[in-house]
Image: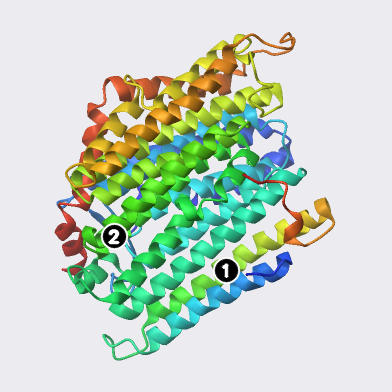
Amino acid sequence: MTQRNMIRILLGIEIILNAGNLLFVYFAATNPHLGVVDPIGQSIVFMSIVTGGAVVSVGLALIVNAYKQFKTTDAGELRRLKW
Amino acid sequence: MIPSALYFMFAPLLIVIVGLLAERMGSPKLRSGFAVLASVWAVASVWMLLGLVQASPDKILVVSLGGNPPLGACLEIDMMGIYVAFSAVLLGFFANVYSFSYMEHDTRLTEYYSLLSALVVGMTGVAFAGDLFTLFLFWETMGIASYALVAFRKENPGPIEAGFKYMVMGSVGSTVLFFGAALLYGMTGTLNFAQMSTVIRGQTGNPWFYLVIAVLIVGFGVKSAIVPMHTWLPDAHPEAPSTISAMLSGMLIETALYALTRVTYVLFEPQMFSLVVAVLSALTMCLANVTALMQKDIKRMLAYSSIAQIGYMLIGLSAGSMFGIRALLLHVFNHSLMKGLAFLSAGSLVHTADTRNIDELKGIGRAMPVTTLALFVALLGLGGVPGTGGFISKMFLFGSAIPAGYMWLTVLGVLNSAFSMGYYLMTMYKLISKPEKDLAGFHEAPLAMLGVTVVMAILVIWTGVLPATVIGMAEEGARALVENLATYVGVIMR
């Protein structure tokens, strides 16, 4: 998240999301209340991958437009809006 | 079984199909007309759901989606959910009608209307969700639609920059929320609110709970613009089209606050998070009001004022009583009307004058008297002047902090409210003062825009003069959350 490149920022977000996904997979496999692997824990991981994909596609579309406007993918250049 | 009143949630898909057909046939009016029709459908559906909920024995309607609650997802619709959803669809209806004239010179309107509809559906879904799984999905629907809508006018640099900032902050917030959901799932082995509540509510002292509360406040707090996480809002709101500013400011941040209230309240005892929320509330309103005073851009000033209003609403959550939640709900409805009205009428002024600078808008009130009058009603309501809805809900909010023992918060709230009148009155004064340039080219806004602002102004005054109906609805909503929590849990558990 400390990167200045917009695409790297987006990748950082995906990595945080994957931390949550892994946590869900782990807890679903070791759920003490059910004997088997919990299906809801796994299905939320699938859904979060899907929504993560949607967020990334919106983000990439924004980056493409930002590149057209500013001719750079450096997030530090986007500093017109302050306060 | 899914009740037919919920079918309005497929409206975004229908709008895409009808919009594409209308483009092919070359009749853009059909597309806008259908979007307005779909928003009327949403209002009617929520009204029908209200009837269904009131007819059911516990005033709670459980809709299982793919299996019963331990394994499947579910919507658990109670009076509080209906209340928030109704505010959302009502504002969505106004925004759609307003777009009819406001957006007519923009292109890509099929995308615009379907995303706007998806935003409303996402909000109602968050309001109805019965487990974290459903909540998270609708949360992302709402989020993705709003990221795209903020950056809708992509030919200008401002919206792209604001949209990117909002997208990064919003999606980090969602991932933090997702992480919190994973922690809760690990502790309780389920995602259903009712089942989680039976496992962990009432226990105190476990340090993990405080971690989860912190993660939830950060996750929901990014979208609801609580102060350390608010920096996206003053950029995103002015740069978005005015209808979208009205939706974001009027309802999106409140939906996030509703979700925070619902989850923390159902899972934890109020005294576990009350003090933290009180401190955040004080920070939010003080910082936002001081910054709002420095703004030259009219929409940016309104955006900071939204953050301040979120601060007032947090007082209701920190009070942790039915009185506090009732005040919070009342202010959610009133604020959705007042801030929606403020953004829409300011949007009409900006649309005509083509500038957002308050100094350059000087004297425009003389050319557009009706729109400016509507803006005055909204600003007076936001400042809490008696006779508008804002006064009633602010009185309840500030009053609710006293029994909870936060006298300092009440004093701070009243002072802030008085302080905020400073920039509202300054704006009003500038709008009607002597114009510096020729106003010959400026006319009153088109009929659809004017009609919406006038109707909303009447509603704001109506909620202030005859507030009994809205208070009654808010009270039922608050009772569903606070007093009937056992019923809320029991409906799922049996």
Residue on which disc 2 sits = B273
User: Could one spot residue B434 in this view of the protein?
Assistant: yes
Q: Which mark is residue A52?
A: 1
Determine the residue positioned at 44% across, 49% down.
Answer: B123
Q: Residue furthest right?
A: A71
Residue B107 lies, in percent from the top left, at 73, 39
In which quadrant of the rendered view does residue B468 lie? top left
User: Could one spot residue B88 in this view of the protein?
Assistant: no
Residue B15 lies, in percent from the top left, at 58, 45
Determine the residue positioned at 70% across, 33% down.
Answer: B27
Closer to us: B375 or B18: B375
> In the drawing, does residue B468 fall left or right of residue B443?
left
Determine the residue positioned at 85% across, 56% down.
Answer: A71
Q: CA distance from mark 1 to mark 2?
A: 30 Å
Residue A77 lies, in percent from the top left, at 77, 56
Q: Which mark is residue B55?
A: none
- Quarter of the picture holding the C terminus of chain B: bottom left
- Of all chains, the one bearing label 2 is B
Residue B319 lies, in percent from the top left, at 24, 48
Closer to us: B65 or B370: B370
- Quarter of the picture holding the N terminus of chain B: bottom left
Question: Which amino acid type is shown beneath numbered disc 1?
Answer: Gly
Closer to us: B61 or A15: A15
Foreground: disc 1 or disc 2: 2
